[in-house]
Amino acid sequence: MSPDQQSGRRLHEAMQQTSDAFGRHRADLVLRAAVRGRRLRLVRRARIAALAAAVAGAAVLGAAQLSPGAAPAPPPAVTPTPTPTAAPTATPAPAPTRLPSAAPPVGGPRSGPISAQLAAFLSPGTSTRVSSNGAFEDGRVTLSQAGTASGSVLYDDGRGRASVGVTLADIDRRTPTCDPGPWLFCDILADGTAVKAEQTRLTSGYLLWSVYVLHPDGRKITVNEFNTDRIPENATTASPTRAEPPLTIDQLQAIALSPHWSR
């Protein structure tokens, strides 16, 4: 036997042995494989369903532990709380000032009849110079026999006539104070000047409004007014000619504090 024949025979025997190792061919091999594949898919689906059920059960158990005996209620609606607005800080009202504000200082000459100098302070209207006693010349007061220098004016602002007067005096230097009295107010200014005011109804029926100023150097100024057209000092009786005097207390104060009357 030739070598080629021997090689062919050995190849045939090897292939026959391999075929015998696989066994005989079975006709239902494909059918059995399909059945086994369906069984594996069913098992896989069952495992997935069991896992999902376990997860759902754990979620229900956790909710029951958080709220035993009842399903968890939805959170209540939250009403937004408005941000509180800070209330404005109350600003304390400033203390009333007694500085001149109602009548400007007179820039005219500080000489001549005191009644004429006083009339220059009054608002436009009808002014009649009535009398002057003593003199006020360039800051110097010459006293009358009554110990004062004074002037009076009859003034009509269109609402009835009234009398307005100013009195000047120099007294001993002193520290002005607010002595007890029926004052409408009594103030000590920054420079030590005392300012007092009063409103009085006299027994004869008319009103007297007055402002008193005393400077530390002893210069004393009094400005007053009446709601009558007669000078009270020279009348035994006087009837009111208007409901109130024409000038406000602030206007009287501005006249009394004017530098016009300073030394």
Image (tube, grey):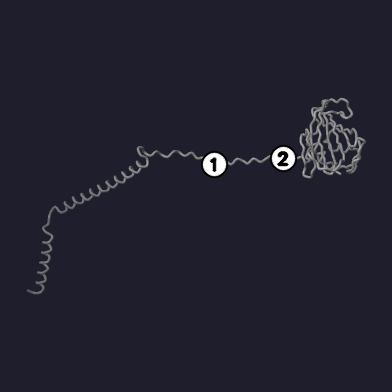
Q: Horizontal placement of 24 versus 241: left or right? A: left
**Circles 1, 2 touching at the beta carbon (< 8 Å):** no
| Residue 248 makes an appearance in the image | no
Q: Nearer the viewer, residue 56 or 195?
A: 195
- Residue at disc 1, secondary structure: loop
Name the residue that disc number 2 marks: 95
Circle 2 residues within 10 Å: few <14, some 14–19, many ≥20: few
Residue kind at label 2, given as amino acid type: Ala
- Tell me residue 82's x, y (percent): 53, 40
Q: Nearer the viewer, residue 179 or 97?
A: 179
Picture layout, residue 134 above or below residue 1: above
* Residue 108 numbered tag: none
Name the residue that disc number 1 marks: 83
Q: Horizontal placement of 44 versus 156: left or right? A: left
Picture layout, residue 85 above or below residue 9: above
Residue found farthest to the left: 1
**Real-space CA distance between mark 1 and mark 2, rounded to the nearest whole angstrom:** 36 Å
Q: Quadrant of the C terminus?
A: top right
Q: Horizontal placement of 220 versus 22: left or right? A: right
